[in-house]
Structure formats: C-alpha cells, structure tokens
Image (cartoon, rainbow, N blue to C red):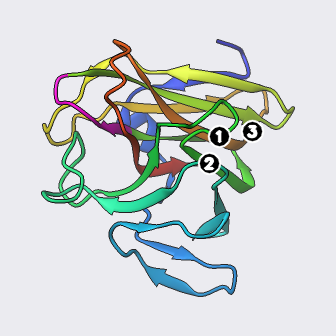
C-alpha cells in the first residue's frame, strides 16, 4: 500500500486502544442527544455523532441512510445480535456519493468497522474503505471476499492505520459485488472504531 497507510483486517488489532461510535445515540445540530430509533432515516444533509471529544459527521450527499440493529425482522446478516448499524443504499451511489461517508472533527490515526450487506444469502461481497489522509490523498483498502450469511459475528473487519505521522480525516465505507450479481441493496456498517 504505502508507508503512510496500512490495512487492518483483524477485529482485535482494530479495536485495541480505540474509542467506539456505536450509533446508539446521535447529536443533532442543537447539541441535543437522542437515543437511536430503529429504521429511522437520516433526514438532513448532515448528522453528527459525538464520542468523547470527537464529532463524527455523517455526510449524506447520496441515497438515504438508515439507523438499525442486527436482529430478526430488521437486518439479519453477518453481525452479532443487537449490533447497532448504519445502513447505506448501494443502488445509485456514484463515486462521489459513497453509501456511508464519515468526517472526523479531529484527525485519527486508526479507523475501521465490520461491514455487511443486504442481498441474497451466499452471494459474495468485498468490503471497501476509502480513507482521506491529512495531505488530501485518498486511498482504497479492501478485505477478502466473504459470503453474505446469517452467521453471527462473521462480518469482515476492514480498517486503516496511518504511519509516518499521517492522520485520517474522512472515510467512505462501501462494498463491491464480488460476482457482479447486482443483488446487493444496502451496505451495513457496525460500530466504528477510531483512535
């Protein structure tokens, strides 16, 4: 990849020493914090989550995003039961409108999450993460292809860690249809880990 950036594909390596954005509450622009309501669309252009001193802004310049949880009747793929999720629409999302686009108020040295999809069981997908470094350069990282399943805790981990004093200020989570079936409807991001 680069001396400035490396992929993190292990959950323990990703989560070590990190803070977590779990989508269970979010801050509106009036500073209030409300609990997560299942399957409620992000209505404004921006929505921010506050974790400690970090403000994570969801940039919504494409298809509707939805807050949800992994459980029967809501979203039942690859995540642990009750995992809070942010779901982005894949269809119609262009290069500049990735399904889940996050900006950090303070640059981070490590960021990532588990990713899954909504589609046909058994279809293969590749988790994709684009990161923007503090020098303005974007890099794409991918995880090995996995089959969409209902096996709990099987969502692939994909993260990035910087080197050479670099930091990350923006990320875009997406997925690639490994077999080009066109059957995936949503990308799902679980807890986001950052340092």
Residue 10: x and y in percent read 38, 29
Q: Please name the residue that numbered disc 1 is placed on.
A: 97
Q: Where residue 167 is drawn, which disc sits there? A: 3
Q: Where residue 62 is drawn, which disc sits there? A: 2
The CA span between labels 2 and 1 is 5 Å
Give left or right: position of 53 versus 33. right
Give left or right: position of 73 versus 98. left
Residue nearest the viewer, comparing 193 with 121: 121
Mark 3 or 2, which is nearer the eye? Answer: 2
Image quadrant assignment for residue 99 = top right
In the rendered structure, which segment of residues is drawn in magenta? Answer: 115-122
- Which quadrant of the figure contains the N terminus? top right
In the image, residue 116 lies in the stretch drawn in magenta: yes
Label 2 near label 3: C-beta < 8 Å?
no
Residue 51 can be seen, yes or no:
no
The CA span between labels 3 and 2 is 26 Å
Label 1 near label 2: C-beta < 8 Å?
yes
Residue nearest the viewer, comparing 26 with 195: 26
In the image, residue 135 lies in the stretch drawn in magenta: no
Rendered view: 93 above or below 125: below
- Whichever of callouts 3 and 2 sits on the residue coming sooner in the sequence is 2
Rendered view: 40 above or below 108: below
Look at 66% across and 85% down and name the residue there: 31
**Within 10 angstroms of label 1, few (less than 14), some, or many (20 or more) residues?**
some
Residue 118: x and y in percent read 29, 40
**Within 10 angstroms of label 2, few (less than 14), some, or many (20 or more) residues?**
many
Look at 52% across and 73% down and name the residue there: 26
- Whichever of callouts 2 and 1 sits on the residue coming sooner in the sequence is 2
């Amino acid at each position: 990849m680069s001396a400035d950036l490396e992929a993190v594909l292990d959950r323990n390596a990703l989560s070590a020493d990190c803070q977590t954005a779990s989508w269970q509450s979010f801050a509106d622009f009036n500073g209030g914090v409300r609990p997560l309501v299942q399957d409620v669309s992000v209505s404004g252009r921006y929505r921010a989550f506050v974790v400690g001193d970090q403000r994570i802004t969801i940039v919504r310049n494409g298809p509707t995003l939805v807050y949800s949880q992994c459980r029967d009747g809501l979203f039942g793929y690859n995540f642990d039961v009750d995992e809070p999720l942010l779901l982005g629409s894949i269809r119609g999302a262009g290069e500049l409108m990735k399904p889940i686009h996050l900006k950090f108020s303070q640059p981070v040295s490590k960021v990532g999450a588990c990713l899954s999809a909504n589609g046909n069981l058994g279809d293969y997908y590749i988790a994709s993460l684009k990161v923007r470094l503090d020098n303005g350069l974007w890099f794409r990282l991918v995880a090995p292809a996995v089959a969409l399943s209902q096996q709990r805790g099987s969502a692939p981990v994909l993260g990035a860690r910087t080197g050479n004093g670099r930091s990350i200020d923006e990320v875009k989570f997406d997925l690639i249809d490994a077999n080009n079936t066109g059957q995936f409807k949503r990308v799902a991001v679980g807890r986001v880990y950052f340092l």
